[in-house]
């Protein structure tokens, strides 16, 4: 058969394709698998910021502690296990965050609680570093309020060198709280295993007293414009929560009204062994939950999973927890 121009063109194209493929094969580099990129194995700084009306609230992470299940009262071990399993918390030790809250009203910079510093071991004491990472300096804070004088809330008042961690701040606690923890006679009569708590409270507060920077308050007092104290005794004699309000938004900083989101929302009658008087702590918790749910307030809890901010809904005889969602600052409600 005689070749036509079409057959000639087809053979030429095939020859060209084969030649190109051969050339590419000869020229292609040998691929070598790259070494795996090392894992970073560190977490982001522990702060979270949100707007509350015209107020800026920054949650600060101090670290975590593990609470033994046996500390929780008014529930059988089986009930405790079931509640924890429902929240996928199955370890004997319940990992519990320690949070603090920095409130910038535009006029005042107020820190609610100070973390544990070095009082409780290596998993805590990160508040100072996270405060700095959040863009603030300790010297800028003008007011420090303490929900209660347990060491995971008050030990951070003192820097590692023994100086005031917040040199320009006035320290505020409830009068009933300071009357209890700073009273040497009360400390002497306390059980031996509790006397260390009294010692840590005195050591944390005394330098502020000596510097003339200690000013107790009573429940209902305004701390600064926009922040009002709420007496919620029971966990300790002067335990205090704080209501923060700007425009049409309100947040209740609960302090230690709750220690376990997995148990105490669904079973608010469950108490913890650290309570000074559970018969007062339980109704205080229910009252704050009811108010927050009915008025759609935000709540912030020292021992809720970081950042510890969210809202409460009423679910029959119990409550539901709706944690805040991450969003760019100022986006949302």
Image (spheres, grey):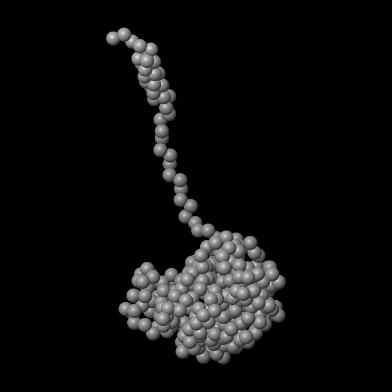
Q: Nearer the viewer, residue 165 or 83?
A: 83
Q: Residue at x 47, y 71 (%)?
A: 322
- The correct choice, above or below, for 261 with respect to 331 in the image is below
**Quarter location, residue 76:** bottom left
Residue 201 appears in which quarter of the rendering? bottom right
Q: How many numbered tags mark residues here? A: 0
Q: Can residue 134 be spotted in the picture?
A: yes
Vertical relation: 2 (above or below) 195 = above
Can residue 259 be seen here? The reply is: no
Farthest top residue?
2
Q: Where's residue 75, x and y in %? A: 36, 82
Depth check, front residue: 145 or 125: 145
- Residue 5 vs 300, above or below: the answer is above
Percent x, y of residue 278: 46, 87
- Viewer-proximal residue among 148 and 7: 7
Look at 51% across and 65% down and name the residue there: 325
Residue 53: percent from left, percent from top: 63, 70
The residue most toward the left is 1
Quarter occupied by the N terminus: top left
User: Residue 264 vs residue 82: left or right?
Assistant: right
Q: In which quarter of the image is the C terminus?
A: bottom right
Residue 13: x %, y % from top left: 39, 18
Q: Which of 94 and 268 is in front in this view?
A: 268
Residue 45 falls left or right of residue 207 = left
Identify the residue at image location x=40%, y=38%.
33
25 over 261 or under it: above or below: above
């Amino acid at each position: 058969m005689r070749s036509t121009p079409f057959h000639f063109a087809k053979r030429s194209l095939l020859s060209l394709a084969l030649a190109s493929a051969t050339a590419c094969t000869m020229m292609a580099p040998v691929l070598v698998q790259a070494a795996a990129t090392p894992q970073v194995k560190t977490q982001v700084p522990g702060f979270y910021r949100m707007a509350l009306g015209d107020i800026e609230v920054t949650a600060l992470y101090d670290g975590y502690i593990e609470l033994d299940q046996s500390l929780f009262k008014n529930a059988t071990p089986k009930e405790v296990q079931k509640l924890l399993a429902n929240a996928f918390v199955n370890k004997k030790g319940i990992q519990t965050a320690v949070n603090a809250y920095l409130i910038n009203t535009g006029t005042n910079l107020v820190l609610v609680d100070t973390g544990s510093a070095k009082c409780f071991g290596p998993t805590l004491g990160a508040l100072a570093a996270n405060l700095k990472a959040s863009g603030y300096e300790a010297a800028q804070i003008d007011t420090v309020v303490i929900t209660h004088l347990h060491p995971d809330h008050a030990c951070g008042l003192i820097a590692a060198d023994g100086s005031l961690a917040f040199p320009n701040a006035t320290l505020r606690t409830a009068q009933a709280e300071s009357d209890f923890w700073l009273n040497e006679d009360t400390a002497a009569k306390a059980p031996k295993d509790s006397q260390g708590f009294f010692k840590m409270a005195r050591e944390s507060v005394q330098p502020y007293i000596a510097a003339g920077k200690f000013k107790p308050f009573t429940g209902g007092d305004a701390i600064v414009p926009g922040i009002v104290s709420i007496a919620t005794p029971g966990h300790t004699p002067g335990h205090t929560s704080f209501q923060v309000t700007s425009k049409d938004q309100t947040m209740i900083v609960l302090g230690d009204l709750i220690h376990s989101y997995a148990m105490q929302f669904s079973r608010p009658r469950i108490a913890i062994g650290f309570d000074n008087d559970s018969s007062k702590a339980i109704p205080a918790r229910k009252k704050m939950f009811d108010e927050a749910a009915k008025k759609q307030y935000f709540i912030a809890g020292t021992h809720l999973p970081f950042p510890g901010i969210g809202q409460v809904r009423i679910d029959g005889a119990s409550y539901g927890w709706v944690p805040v969602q991450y969003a760019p600052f100022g986006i949302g409600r």
